[in-house]
Each structure stands twice: as C-alpha cells, then as structure tokens.
Amino acid sequence: MTLSRRDALNAAAGLAVMGAASGAPTKSASAALDLTAPENKLEAYRRIRGRNDGELALWWWNGYVWAKPNNDVAVHIMTVEGLTFQRLTTNEDGNLTEAMAGRGTFRDADTNAPLETWTNPFNGVTAKPDHVRSLNRGVITPDGLERKHTERTLNFVSEITAPMITGHQIFMRENFVTKNKGRAPGEVSTRSSLSTYTADAADIADDNATFRPATFNYQSLGGFRPWMEMDDSTGMLSWQTVGQKLERGSADAPAGIKDWVDANYPGFLDDPGI
C-alpha cells in the first residue's frame, strides 16, 4: 500500500483531533501544523484567508441581496459580485496585520447584468446603485479583529473561532457586529456580519504548500443603503454570498467581473494599493 502526502497530512490532522478529544498525546504523521493547538489559531486563519505570509490573495465572491420590509417576508431584490484582495502579515507579537481592498457591482436579479439604475420595488423610486468598494486595515488577534474606532463608532465587537475539524475539512468562523452614527443627526446604522471559511485540513496543515484552496459563506444583516432612498426604520437588508480564493489571482477570475473591474477601476487588479 502506498501513502500519499495528502493521506499523511489528513491522517496527522485526524490524529490531532482524536488526541485532543481523548486528552492523549499524539504523534504527527508528518511535519505539519497542529490545527488543534490554541497557539496555532492565527496561523491556521492566515493560511485559510491569505497566501504565504505577507503575500496578496485574491477572492472572487457573488450572491444575493435580500430586502425585508417590517412585518413582511424577505424579497430577493438584486445580486452582487466582486473581487477582493487580502494581505495578512505576521507581526513580531504573533498577531496579524490585515489589509483588504475590494471592488464589486450590484446586478439585476433576473438578468445578472450590472445595474446602472435600479427601481425600488417598495417605493417605485429609480436610483443609481453605488459600486461595492472596500478598504479595510486592522490588527487581528486570537480574539478577533481590532479596528481603529472613530468618533462615529458606537460599538464594534469581533470574534474568530477556533478551528473546527470534521472529517477532512476545517472550518473557521469570523463574526463581527457594528453600530455607528449615521451622516444625519440622530441617525444610527447597525450591521452583523457572519462568515464561515472552509478548506481541506491537509492543505492548511501542510507547511510546504504554495497555495491552499479555500471557500467562504457570508451573511450580513443591516440597514438599507442610502442610495436606495429607504428609511432604515422600515426594514432591513441582508447579503447572502459565497466566495473562493483564486490560485492564479485575476487570471482565474470569471470574465464578467474581471472585465467590469478593469473597465471601472483600471489598474486595480494589478495593484490594489495595499
């Protein structure tokens, strides 16, 4: 019988889980990261979310946007798609510095064409959708993400859960909730964001891997976007998206979103500025 490197790494991950459950010491079948050791939590997270230490990883994502008027059922009002760069760098204290930049577009719920205008089904108002743009920087500790609070920040709570290994898969959850002052006096906005990252445990444990495939599921709940011209007191907006880390970067991105980003943000895919 022959034993492949992946078989050995899967066996090592499985033995580590069994040992953690029984309290018995285990021996690794190969030189691999112990995914059950608390001190390796951030390294496992970095390997799932990013690439090699300090390198850029590119994620493609798409999904549904739902609107829920108060006292009524949620309605699928549009889709959304984008590309987001992620850079995670290990600091001297063992924490991670995060830099993230993304570009995306809202799309028609039926045709999936990028939306230039959108007619609100609840009030009939025709609006011009904003693009989905992100630029986030922060420090990630074993407890979660730390972001610089501003005078508008009323609350920010984040957590990163310990790895959960089931069979050959590893799952890590990243959740945060925010409450901020709005632009107008007395206006307040809230958002809860819940993400689950999934990968093969052997890929994440492998110290010598050059690329570690991973996917994510993301859901958020918050208020309506300002351009929708809806009062947040009338309901909520929810995102339901999935994503995939791209091995060859933008070369592996779906043509439609890659062309859209290139057309609207020339040079971004070559240098996102992080």
Image (tube, rainbow, N blue to C red):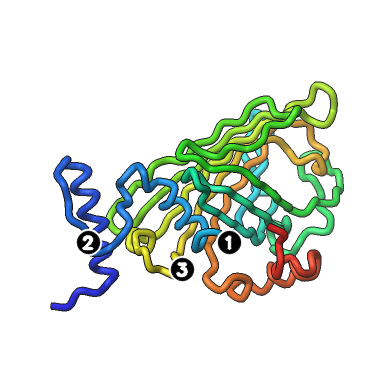
**Mark-to-mark CA distance, 2 and 1:** 29 Å
What is the C-alpha distance between the residues marked 3 and 1? 13 Å
Q: Judge whether 266 appears above or below 121 on screen.
A: below
Query: In percent of the image, x 34 and y 42: which residue is there?
Result: 38
Left or right: 84 in relation to 197: right
- Residue mark closest to the camera, 3 vs 1: 3
The answer to which of 190 and 25 lies nearer the viewer is: 25
Q: Residue at x 67, y 47 (%)?
A: 136
Residue 90, position as x, y percentages in the image: 51, 51
Amino acid type, label 2: Ala
Q: Residues within 10 Å of mark 2 (few under 14, many from 20)?
A: some
| Residue that mark 2 sits on | 11
94 left or right of 119 in image: left
Q: Position of residue 91 (x, y in %)?
A: 52, 48
Please identify the quarter of the rendering in which residue 253 is found: bottom right
Q: Which mark is residue 256?
A: none
Sort mark 1 into few (<14), some (14-19) or many (20+) by Cα contacts within 10 Å.
many
> Which image quadrant is residue 222 in?
top right
Does dot 3 land on a helix, a strand or a loop?
loop
Q: Amino acid at mark 1?
A: Trp
Q: Counting residues from the N terminus, which is met first, the one under dot 3 or under dot 1?
A: 1
Q: Quadrant of the C terminus?
A: bottom right
**Gap between marks 3 and 2 measured at Cα:** 20 Å
Quarter containing the N terminus: bottom left
- Residue 144, placed above or below residue 170: above
Give the percent coordinates (x, y) of residue 203.
Answer: 37, 64
Which sits earlier in the primary sequence, circle 3 or circle 2? 2
Which residue is identified by label 3? 211
The amino acid type of the residue labelled 3 equals Phe
Secondary structure of residue under mark 1:
strand
Tag 1 residue: 59
Residue 117 against residue 264 in the figure, above or below = above
